[in-house]
Image: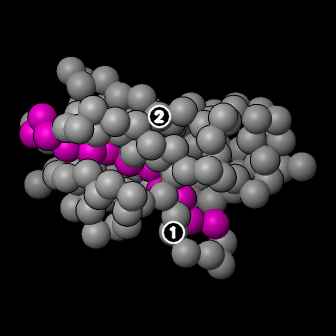
């Protein structure tokens, strides 16, 4: 049973920064992707970024490109989401997810992610 535990959420003013962390317990596969999703109030969950080891690729959604960056520590099985220049529309619940395969152009489809964390709340005030 894989456990994904997010941390680092909170409240911040527009223009500020946060770094989210996701620790994956007992997840030992080397061919996997770890991603971040978010769900704003009243909206469907959307993919923010993913980082895979096979293929070795990082993908960031256009909505956050240039402001958010995903990274991972394979030794610690931890993935990070650095969020800069935050905007009120970035408010939402942020989820970490892990999957066994890269979905290519459909990387942000939830079907490619087998495991999900409980989420961490990010609130950006104007």
Is residue 110 rendered to the left or right of residue 21?
A: left
Residue 76 numbered mark, or none: none
How far is the residue under mark 2 from the one under mark 1? 18 Å
* Residue at 79% in and 53% down: 88
- Callout 2: 10 Å neighbours few (<14), some, many (20+)? many
Dividing the picture into quarters, in which one does residue 32 lie?
top left
- Seen in the picture, residue 120 relative to 114 is either above or below; the reply is above
Q: Earlier in the sequence, mark 2 or mark 1?
A: 1
* Residue at 48% in and 58% down: 47
Give the residue number, with chain letter if any, for mark 2: 70
- Seen in the picture, residue 100 relative to 81 is either above or below; the reply is below
- Seen in the picture, residue 78 relative to 2 is either above or below; the reply is above
Q: Which residues are magenta?
A: 29-40
Residue closest to the eye, 69 or 93:
69
Q: Is residue 36 magenta?
A: yes
Residue closest to the eye, 8 or 80:
80
User: Dot 2 lies on which element?
Assistant: strand
Q: Is residue 84 magenta?
A: no
- Callout 1: 10 Å neighbours few (<14), some, many (20+)? some
- Seen in the picture, residue 98 relative to 30 is either above or below; the reply is below
User: Dot 1 lies on which element?
Assistant: loop
Dividing the picture into quarters, in which one does residue 41 lie?
bottom right
Give the residue number, with chain letter if any, for mark 1: 45
| Image marks 2 and 1: residues in contact by CB distance under 8 Å | no
* Residue at 67% in and 36% down: 67
Q: Evaluate whether residue 34 shows in this view.
A: yes
Dividing the picture into quarters, in which one does residue 27 lie?
top left
């Amino acid at each position: 049973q894989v456990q994904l535990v997010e941390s680092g959420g909170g409240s911040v003013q527009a223009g500020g920064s946060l770094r989210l962390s996701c620790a994956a317990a007992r997840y030992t596969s080397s061919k996997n992707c770890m991603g971040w999703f978010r769900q704003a109030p009243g909206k469907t969950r959307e993919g923010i970024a993913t980082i895979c080891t096979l293929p070795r690729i990082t993908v960031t959604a256009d909505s956050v490109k240039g402001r958010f960056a995903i990274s991972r520590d394979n030794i610690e099985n931890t993935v990070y989401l650095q969020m800069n220049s935050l905007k009120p529309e970035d408010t939402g619940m942020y989820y970490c997810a892990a999957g066994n395969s890269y979905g290519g152009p459909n990387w942000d489809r939830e079907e490619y992610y087998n495991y999900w964390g409980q989420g961490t709340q990010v609130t950006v005030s104007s």
